[in-house]
């Protein structure tokens, strides 16, 4: 695993919303920025451009954004 790969562990929750994941990992500065970046087609989830701001990410999801790859475990 390189410096561009992040593992995010779901603890005591079934999922995390995409916009919250980006904020939690400090990949964006605010919820507004997360929404804008998602709607600008800058986020890929499981190999597909994702436009749903509150997409529920569950274990096994892979998110690509700003040169980072996040594995939800």
Image (spheres, helix red, strand yellow):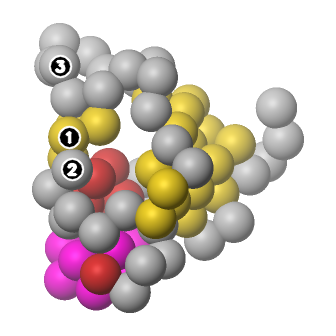
Q: Which disc is residue 56 wearing?
A: 1
The answer to whether residue 73 is left or right of residue 57 is right
Q: Are marks 3 and 2 in contact (CB under 8 Å)?
A: no
Magenta segment includes 29? yes
Q: Residue at x 29, y 81 (%)?
A: 39
Callouts 1 and 3 close, C-beta under 8 Å: yes
Nearer the N terminus, badge 1 or badge 3?
3
Question: Which of the numbered marks, if any, corresponds to residue 55?
Answer: 2
Mark 3–mark 2 Cα distance, whole angstroms, equals 13 Å
* Residue where numbered disc 3 is placed: 14
Looking at the image, is 36 positioned above or below residue 34? below
Q: Indicate the position of residue 49 as horizontal and vertical percent values.
A: 46, 64
Q: Is residue 33 visible?
A: no
- The secondary element bearing badge 1 is classed as strand
Most extreme residue toward the front is 48
Left or right: where 2 falls relative to 48: right
């Amino acid at each position: 695993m390189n410096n561009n790969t992040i593992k995010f562990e779901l603890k005591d929750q079934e999922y995390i919303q995409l916009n919250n994941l980006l904020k939690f990992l400090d990949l964006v500065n605010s919820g507004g920025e997360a929404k804008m970046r998602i709607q600008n087609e800058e986020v890929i989830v499981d190999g597909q451009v994702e436009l749903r701001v509150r997409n529920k990410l569950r274990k096994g999801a892979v998110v690509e954004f700003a040169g980072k790859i996040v594995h939800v475990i």
